[in-house]
Image: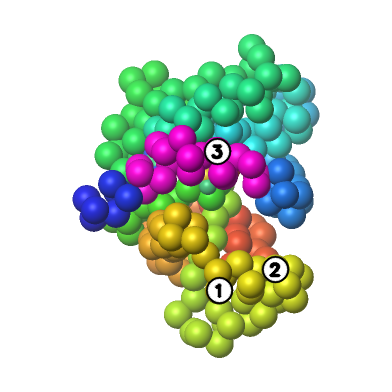
Amino acid sequence: MVGSAESNAAVWKSDASVAQWVATEEERERARAWPRRLLAELLPFAEHEEFTFVDLGAGTGAASRAVLDRYPSATAVLADYSTQMMQEGQRALAAYAGRYRYVEIDMAAGRWPDDLAGGLPAVISSLCVHHLTDERKDGLFREVFARLAPGGWYLNYDPVSNEDPAVEDAWRRVQDRRDPQTALKRAHRTPEEQARWDNHVRHIIPLGPQLEYLRSAGFEAVDVYWKELDHVIFGGRRPVA
Ligand SMILES: C[S@@+](CC[C@H](N)C(=O)[O-])C[C@H]1O[C@@H](n2cnc3c(N)ncnc32)[C@H](O)[C@@H]1O
């Protein structure tokens, strides 16, 4: 576990890795516009309601921006542990000045800033929980539950795996048909790209256990609110009473 946490930090706290990630972000985000918008729409707020949400593993703030766009009176707390990603985020979030702040958190350690101790109306995460060990996924969901206000929602957008290789083959077939470069890139990764890929897939697990983590943490209204191939939006809310 320590080794994998260190490799993950080596990717996300590396100037070169983050520069490469940011350089290709726009292209990846084009395909994510719809799930990003849906995640925002799933939050139970009126359009002009004032509320503050937390975005875990926020990176440069792609998920936060979708929520801030959907709710013009909302403010965001973006939590991450990579100085490089947070610096890039300051640039990406320039148009949202005054509506967001960054805080440092290491989700692998389970220590949260004192001012995020409870009463949160909503917590979101995207494309980062899969970097945690199963023990920490479970732990993180419990920590989120404990910090949500009654009725508060948690939504997570993330890749999952499947134990049936035929299912994974079907996912890959569609991905390769949509972008023939994908298969080529897979076969010709540089050592750095391979290290980033290994870090990406290391802790991706099926959906079922993650829904169980949510339920056993106490969440209700647990559902898979969207799914396309290996990407899902799932979550639930803390009971009102
Ligand atoms: C693939 S990026 C996703 C960023 C953003 N949520 C998005 O949807 O574009 C993964 C992010 O998770 C952050 N991250 C990975 N492990 C983390 C940890 N243990 N604690 C805090 N942040 C972490 C990385 O620094 C990075 O910003």
- Please name the amino acid that badge 3 sits on: Ala
Gap between marks 3 and 2 measured at Cα:
21 Å
Tell me what residue is drawn at x 58 percent, y 83 percent: 169
**In the image, the residue with mark 3 has its CB under 8 Å from the nearest atom of ligand 1:** no
Amino acid type shown at disc 2: Gln
Q: For the view shown, which residue lies furthest in the bottom direction?
A: 166
Q: How far apart, in angstroms, are the residues tagged by discs 1 and 2?
A: 10 Å
Q: Is residue 119 above or below residue 7?
A: above
Q: Which residues are magenta?
A: 8-25
Q: Which disc number belongs to residue 181?
A: 2
Q: Residue at x 63, y 74 (%)?
A: 183
**In front of the other: 5 or 179:** 179
Q: Is residue 161 left or right of residue 67?
A: left
Seen at 56% across and 87% down, the residue is 166
Q: Position of residue 135 (x, y in %)?
A: 28, 55
Q: Quadrant of residue 231?
A: bottom right
The answer to if 20 sits in the magenta stretch is yes
Closer to the camera in the image, 6 or 227: 6
Instruction: Identify which amino acid the numbered label 1 is placed on.
Output: Ala
Q: Is residue 21 above or below residue 93?
A: below
Give the residue pinned by disc 1. 187
Judge left or right: residue 92 versus residue 152. Answer: right
Main secondary structure found in the magenta portion: helix
Whether residue 34 is visible here, answered yes or no, is yes
Against 72, residue 61 (above or below) is: below
Residue 5, image x and y in percent?
A: 29, 48
Residue hosting label 3: 19
Near mark 3 (Cα within 10 A), the count class, few <14, some 14-19 or many ≥20, is some
